[in-house]
Amino acid sequence: MLKLNKAQQAKYNEIIDQLKVNSIKITEIRSNIIKLIIISEHINIQQLTLKLEKNLANVNLASIYNTIDLLLKEHIITSNTFDGKNIWYELSTNKSAHIKCDNCGNIEHVSADKITNINFDEFRDLILDKKQMLEHVKIELHVICESCTKKRN
């Protein structure tokens, strides 16, 4: 059984309420997928499947993909492709930032409190002339991490 801390439980309850308002049934696999996404900063299908197999007796890959599609459609999660191959999933926010090492592939999620000083209004201003509405912003920084830099020297 997956354990959530108080803040994670509050987020879980918020998501479940959102799904129930839209008359979406909360199955055991959906519940577990939501919890794993909340616990993880970002997770891909392979990791999700392995973790689900540890917690559930019977894991159907089609159910995993269907749940991911549902959560994407409901704007509960978003997807990111950092290496052009693997798709990573995380909770939806209106601001998202990641730092990726182009050498080892390590991906670090930047917490919302660390990007509060970025003026996201400038992004909104870029599209105002086109009479479009900004949904969310994703920032992806590519670096060579400290560990890889030390290995080079």
Image (spheres, rainbow, N blue to C red):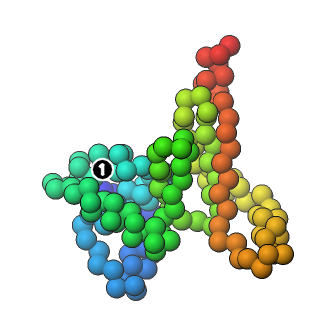
Residue at the far left in the pictured view: 57
The residue at the point 48 percent across, 43 percent down is: 85
Does residue 44 appear left or right of residue 147 in this picture?
Answer: left
- Secondary structure under tag 1 reads helix
The answer to which image quadrant residue 37 occupies is bottom left
**In what quadrant of the picture does the C terminus appear?**
top right
Residue 5 at x, y percent in the picture:
41, 59
Residue 109 at x, y percent in the picture:
58, 48
Q: Is residue 104 above or below residue 19?
A: above
Tell me the amino acid under the disc marked 1.
Thr
Does residue 61 appear left or right of residue 108 in this picture?
Answer: left
Residue 21 at x, y percent in the picture:
40, 86
Q: Is residue 77 above or below residue 58?
A: below
Residue 60 at x, y percent in the picture:
22, 57
The residue at the point 67 percent across, 53 percent down is: 139
The residue at the point 58 percent across, 65 percent down is: 93
